[in-house]
Image: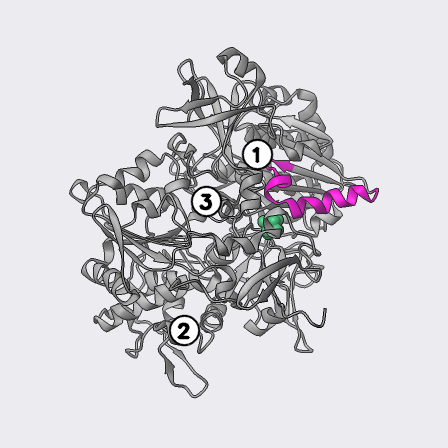
């Protein structure tokens, strides 16, 4: 409509790691419409119900608009200068007892600025993101198997596969636009067999040809059972094994991600006990179901894609099960062709782009570098023009340890006393909240700073609340689950005095610079975040009024880009992302000057870094010989199992309508009306045995805490007898008071999917 005054521009959706593109309509400084972007490969114009309502998240009535400082039992408004000064002076007093807790929702420049501030500025590695809670095991699985992180394939695998296997994954609700690619193929008459391996029936099960109900932790046994059958039946891919893989197992003492080499014969010997009968006992699948999976993977004519997300990552054997599923694909040769791929998904919009690639985890540096290696530290110090030795060689606290240390009183050895939380809600999402978070209320010597857009379970305990700008209120870049880097520009002003997270970090850094903190200076004595205009004059970006005079996102991104070539995660110049609906790395320049993305890594037909003439080349192989690793990990029981006192399994997770802790989607009336409350899914026979009825409020309790919830029998999800499911989106029903903080030994990611509970009638 030529008379329309709505201006449209592109942005990725604010929510999940699918990374759908939207067109955002702005009129008179307000987002008034959102549409699916027809030019985007990821979603081809389609959005899920959250995406269609994403504009509404900006306009909840209780947006935070001013810095708030605790004043007894209430808060008083303060100016930004004072807020920044308070934070900087606390850090100045004790830089090593400060920690930064961030997020897979940080944009790439925000995460990059935060980790540079900590690791390069404060020589302090106590920075970790909430992605530790959702995909750290996928990272360690990729590193152990490929020597480098992130999926080899991409979403196009969903358009090509003959068989799609979901491993403890419910994409029909969690990644609905991706799932619809498969459903759409079927509706057009293509045959795609969907096999759902899970611990309860979900909406994904409704579309599945086969539902394989497994016991919690059964996935480890199933993967081992498939590999056993491939070897026993002689249907493994001999060419793939001969040319492209080694076999590996954890060291008997002090296992590491490197493990030790074992021969194929030794592998065969170790896996021999995982017969279909034994796997059936461990996993709950029937012998026939296990044989069916073995036969499918043994068929070289099929193209098989495996999909997983939290089910395999939030697991005390998370690294093991991730490595084993990659191993199933390697051993069977279902790898390196479109549609034949093991693919992990992420829940946050930039778990890949910001956490994994930028390196905001406590042991990491940008571009696949790690603080433990001298050469890597030297590379970062050179790019940052910092003196040698500035970066601390010891990894900082991972998430669980960080909160453990923060909630422990200083005089009892707690070594973190000031914690800055940006764009995440640990007061709702940490496991075992009573242990890891709520005790803060009694810790008088600690100081919690929280930057967010709305009041949350976390801001309730904050000493200082900083109002944040969100989504199209700022420039941004993110990276989705298929290695796609996406960019957008600020379209509307944030409300009141809300400010970018990136600006907050730079403003604190500059105040420290003014206070004389040596770490905020580079080798030439200049501010470490200095940004210059076209005339070479420094722009005072730490003052909000000048922050957009230059494009700080672009300046930080171009500096970050120097890291990305170090591990073949090459990114294109900023301008290429302005033009595109994202590009999948590695992105390399062609002879004609254009930039080409990569869809299928390690495959000779597509990946520019595969050695000439090679079909498959794992060029970051941990064994240095271009080969991937097929791991053996013995099955180990879950950390806590139901018993007479606590006889039920509890699994927690998400729902279609709400995104993670619900702090944004609960403000959108359409979404909140559609799913107004958390609930407990109970099997009818358990409900009957406990004499509880539909809708009745009951108490779920574990050895750690309790949560009151209404009962939903035969609801959207249907757990088997002996199991219950509770979503975590509802801040009025904190199921993480009940969950367990036990975590994977390598990834340190907690297991939210299984612990022992009981139901008490009220
Ligand atoms: Fe947004 Fe994810 Fe829905 Fe796509 S699938 S519209 S990225 S929430």
Kindly report which numbered mark, 1 or 3, lies closer to the viewer in this rendering.
3
Across and down, in percent, residue 592 comes to 69, 78
Q: Which residues are magenta?
A: 166-189
Query: Is the C-beta separation of discs 2 and 1 under 8 Å?
Result: no
Query: Is the C-beta separation of discs 2 and 3 under 8 Å?
Result: no
Q: Nearer the viewer, residue 331 or 434?
A: 434
| Residue at image mark 1 | 267
| Residue at image mark 3 | 257
Kindly report which numbered mark, 2 or 3, lies closer to the viewer in this rendering.
2
| Residue 229 is one of the magenta-drawn residues | no
Q: CA distance from mark 1 to mark 3?
A: 18 Å
Label 3 secondary element: loop
First in residue order: circle 2 vs circle 1: 1
The reply to whether residue 248 is visible in this rendering is no
State whether residue 285 is above or below residue 572: above
Label 1 secondary element: helix
Q: CA distance from mark 2 to mark 1?
A: 58 Å
Quarter the C terminus occupies:
top left
First in residue order: circle 2 vs circle 3: 3
Relative side of 74 to 655, left or right? left
| Residue at image mark 2 | 547
Across and down, in percent, residue 48 comes to 64, 48
Label 2 secondary element: loop
């Amino acid at each position: 409509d030529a008379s329309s005054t709505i201006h449209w521009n592109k942005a990725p959706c604010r929510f999940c790691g699918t990374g759908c593109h939207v067109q955002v309509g702005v009129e008179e400084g307000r987002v008034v419409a959102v549409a699916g972007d027809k030019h985007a490969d990821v979603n081809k114009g389609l959005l899920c119900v959250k995406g269609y309502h994403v504009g509404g998240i900006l306009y909840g009535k209780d947006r935070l608009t001013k810095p708030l400082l605790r004043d007894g039992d209430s808060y008083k408004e303060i100016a930004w200068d004072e807020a920044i000064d308070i934070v900087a002076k606390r850090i100045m007093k004790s830089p090593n007892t400060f920690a930064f807790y961030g997020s897979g929702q940080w944009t790439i420049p925000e995460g990059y600025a935060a980790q540079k501030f900590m690791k390069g500025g404060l020589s302090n590695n106590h920075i970790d993101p909430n992605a530790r809670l959702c995909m750290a095991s996928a990272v360690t699985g990729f590193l152990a198997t490929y020597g480098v992180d992130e999926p080899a394939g991409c979403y196009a695998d969903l358009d090509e596969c003959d068989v799609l296997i979901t491993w403890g994954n419910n994409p029909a609700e969690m990644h609905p636009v991706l799932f619809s690619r498969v459903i759409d193929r079927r509706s057009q008459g293509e045959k795609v067999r969907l096999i759902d391996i899970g611990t309860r029936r979900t909406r994904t099960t409704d579309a599945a040809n086969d539902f394989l109900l497994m016991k919690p932790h059964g996935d480890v046994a199933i993967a081992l059972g498939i590999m056993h059958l491939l070897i026993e039946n002689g249907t493994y891919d001999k060419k793939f094994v001969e040319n492209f893989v080694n076999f590996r197992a954890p060291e008997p003492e002090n296992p590491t991600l490197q493990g030790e080499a074992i021969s194929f014969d030794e592998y065969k010997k170790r896996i021999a006990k995982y017969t279909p009968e034994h796997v059936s006992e461990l996993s709950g699948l029937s012998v026939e179901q296990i044989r069916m999976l073995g036969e499918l993977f043994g068929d070289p004519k099929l193209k098989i894609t495996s999909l997983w997300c939290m089910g395999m990552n939030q697991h005390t054997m998370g690294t093991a099960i991730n490595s084993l599923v990659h191993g199933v694909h390697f051993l069977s040769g279902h790898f390196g062709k479109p549609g034949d791929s093991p693919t992990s998904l992420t829940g946050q919009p930039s778990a890949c782009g910001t956490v994994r690639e930028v390196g905001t985890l406590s042991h990491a540096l940008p571009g696949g570098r790690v603080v433990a290696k001298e050469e890597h530290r030297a590379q970062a110090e050179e790019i940052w023009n910092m003196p040698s030795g500035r970066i601390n060689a010891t990894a900082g606290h991972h998430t669980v340890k960080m909160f453990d240390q923060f909630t422990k009183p200083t005089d009892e050895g707690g070594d973190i006393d000031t914690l800055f939380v940006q764009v995440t809600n640990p007061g709702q999402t940490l496991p075992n909240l009573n242990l890891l978070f709520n005790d803060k209320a009694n810790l008088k010597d600690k100081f919690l700073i929280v930057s967010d857009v709305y009041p949350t379970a976390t801001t309730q305990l904050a000493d200082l609340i900083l109002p944040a700008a969100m989504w199209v209120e700022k420039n941004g870049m993110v990276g989705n689950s298929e290695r796609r880097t996406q960019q957008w520009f600020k379209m509307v002003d944030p409300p009141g005095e809300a400010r970018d997270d990136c600006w907050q970090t730079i403003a604190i850094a500059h105040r420290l610079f003014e206070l004389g903190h040596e770490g905020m200076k580079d080798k030439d004595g200049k501010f470490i975040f200095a940004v210059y205009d076209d005339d070479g004059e420094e722009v005072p970006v730490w003052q909000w009024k000048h922050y957009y005079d230059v494009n700080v996102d672009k300046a930080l991104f171009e500096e970050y880009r120097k890291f990305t070539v170090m591990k073949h995660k090459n990114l294109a110049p900023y301008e290429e992302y302005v033009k595109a609906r994202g590009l999948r790395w590695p992105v390399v320049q062609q002879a004609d000057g254009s930039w080409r993305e990569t869809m299928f890594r390690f495959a000779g037909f597509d990946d520019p870094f595969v050695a000439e003439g090679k079909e498959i080349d794992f060029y970051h192989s941990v064994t240095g010989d271009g080969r991937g690793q097929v791991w053996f990990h013995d099955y180990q029981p879950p950390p806590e199992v139901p018993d007479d006192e606590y006889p039920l399994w509890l699994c927690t997770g998400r729902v279609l309508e709400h995104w993670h802790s619900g702090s944004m989607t609960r403000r959108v009336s359409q979404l909140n009306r559609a799913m107004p409350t958390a609930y407990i899914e109970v099997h009818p026979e358990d409900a009957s045995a406990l004499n509880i009825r539909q809708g009745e409020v009951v108490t779920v309790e574990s050895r750690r805490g309790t949560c009151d919830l209404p009962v939903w029998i035969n609801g959207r999800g249907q757990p088997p007898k002996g199991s219950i499911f509770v979503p975590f989106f509802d801040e009025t029903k904190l199921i993480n008071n009940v969950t367990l903080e036990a975590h994977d030994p390598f990834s340190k990611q907690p297991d939210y999917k299984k612990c022992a509970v009981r139901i008490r009638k009220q």
